[in-house]
Image (cartoon, grey):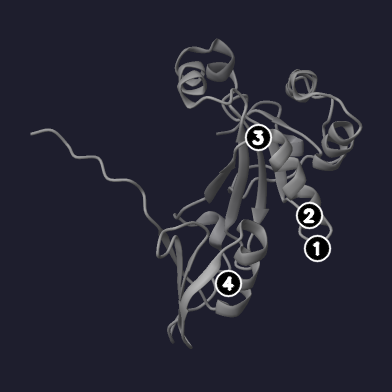
Amino acid sequence: METIKPALHHVTFKTTHLSQMVSWYRTVVGLEVTFQDDNNAWTTNDQANHRIAFLSVPGLSDDAEKIGHNGIHHSAFEYNTFSDLMSSYDRMRREGILPAFCLDHGVTISLYYKDPEGNFVELQSDNFGNWKESTEWMRTSPEFKRDPIGTFFDPEKVFQAHAAGRPFDSLHPAMRAGDFLPDTLPGIGLPIPSSAEMTEPAL
């Protein structure tokens, strides 16, 4: 029998920081509260009744060893264009919210932020502007097979170059080549040696 493929509707977080989480996601991805009480919140940033829910019931506790435990590494949100991604980076940096690390994955430009409980949220734009083309590149490109994680970049350096008028078609290959590396290579939230110690992708 053929599998009927449902669309992803929402994700739900258990949290000990309900108000902080709702506020942070409101700022970062524009969530609005559909319903909230003392222990829960259901939020959305489109026409759905909810896209991200938060459960904050008694008995939950923070995980001091989160990095070394199984779980979701990150959720991701996609912008229509690289310019939209850069504009959102600029808006959030003005509010003191900066990425934990940034990667040119080849298939996407991705800025990874850390929410109040240490969960990563990826904000990305597709480098091909077309899912069919980017999917085919992932499947067949020797470059992606060789380096599926990609190249770190400093978002401020890239933003300033973009703001100065450098087009994406010029920025992207330069980012992949390492021309916009951060001064210190960051960790990516996994129990592996720091990125500064790695000579090859460890994923």
Residue 38 placement (x, y as % from top left): 48, 88
Marks 2 and 4 in Cβ contact (< 8 Å): no
Residue 199 placement (x, y as % from top left): 71, 27
Q: How crowded is mark 3: few (under 14 residues within 10 Å), some or many (20 or more)?
A: some
Q: In this view, does 125 lie to the left or right of 34?
A: right
For marks 1 and 3, give the CA distance: 22 Å
Q: What residue type is labelled 1?
A: Glu
The quarter of the picture where residue 50 lies is bottom left
Q: Name the residue under label 2.
A: 91
Marks 2 and 1 in Cβ contact (< 8 Å): yes
Of residues 154 and 187, the one drawn nearer to the viewer in this rendering: 154
Q: Name the residue under label 4.
A: 22
Of residues 39 and 61, the one drawn nearer to the viewer in this rendering: 39
Of the two numbered discs 2 and 3 on the same chain, state the one appearing first in sequence.
3
Q: Name the residue under label 3.
A: 81
Marks 1 and 4 in Cβ contact (< 8 Å): no
Q: How crowded is mark 1: few (under 14 residues within 10 Å), some or many (20 or more)?
A: few
Marks 1 and 3 in Cβ contact (< 8 Å): no
Q: What residue type is labelled 3?
A: Thr
Q: Which residue is drawn at 78% across and 54% down?
A: 91
For marks 2 and 1, give the CA distance: 7 Å
